Image (tube, rainbow, N blue to C red):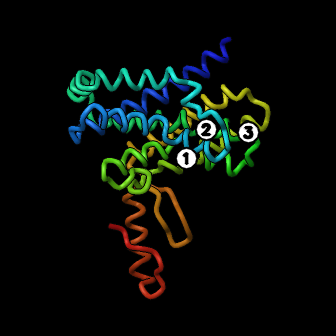
Amino acid sequence: MLIQFFSNLADFIGIVAFAFSGLLAGRERRLDPVGIFVLAFTTAFGGGIIRDIVIDRHPLWFVTHEYYVWVTLVLTIFAPVLVKHFHRAIPYSAFIWLDAIGLGFFAASGTATAYDYGTPMLSSTLLGVATGAAGGMLRDVFMDKLPLVLSDRKPYAFAAFAGSWLTLLLIHFGMNSVAAIWIGSFFICGFRMITWYGNWEIAYSRWGVVIAESKLVSMLLRRRNGKHNDTNTFPPED
């Protein structure tokens, strides 16, 4: 009973966090109620729909958990009041927090679900990343924006990928899947927000991909570019 409670709580937190981030994005463009519901629904359920199609899960998750669709609909109805209050009371970083929370819970649970359906380990982690990141990507595409997962150099999909592997390994070595999902979720959210506040970025170095503080990355890349202009195959820093 307790395990089921925490499993449902993880789903609820992820759905509300992503749905509310969709509401905030929709209000920025002054969309009508239908448009805001489409954004909220897409952000909350888009990644899970893609995962379910790939692993051939029928009916889809949102169909068997219709009450979460009702939650999204209720949030849409009261969107003007909620957004007006939260825009005044909470800074922009709240949007980043909501996105990180949704990313964490969805990526971890998506990985566990894919693995439970017999998907190989690497594919399970990739589907976990898709579950966490695809909804936000679709939201940004609908908003005619370059998706955050592609434009933000701070670890986003990478955080989901690392946390998905952590979740999967915990399950593989015998931990209860619900406990593994919670641990993986906190890891992903913490990783994302630490790198966001610390201004750490993913970039290419002379030897490959690195994660380092953005100023240090820029300095190293400028130094490398100065010494290796003839052999440089990487794009310069903006």
Residue under label 3: 117
Cα separation, mark 3 vs mark 2, equals: 11 Å
Q: In this view, does 226 lie above or below 112?
A: below
Secondary structure type for disc 3: loop
Could you classify mark 2 by the number of other residues whose Cα lies within 10 Å: few (under 14), some (14-19), or many (20 or more)?
many
Residues tagged 2 and 1 counted as in contact (Cβ below 8 A): yes
Cα separation, mark 2 vs mark 1, equals: 8 Å
Q: In the image, 39: left or right of 116?
A: left
Secondary structure type for disc 2: helix
Type of amino acid under label 3: Tyr
Secondary structure type for disc 1: helix
Residue farthest along the top direction in this orientation = 1
Foreground tag (3 vs 2): 3
Q: Position of residue 173 (x, y in %)?
A: 79, 36
Cα separation, mark 1 vs mark 3, equals: 16 Å
Residue under label 1: 130
Q: Residue at x 28, y 38 (%)?
A: 26
Could you classify mark 3 by the number of other residues whose Cα lies within 10 Å: few (under 14), some (14-19), or many (20 or more)?
few
Residues tagged 3 and 2 counted as in contact (Cβ below 8 A): no
| Location of residue 79 (image quadrant) | top left
Type of amino acid under label 2: Gly
Residue under label 2: 110
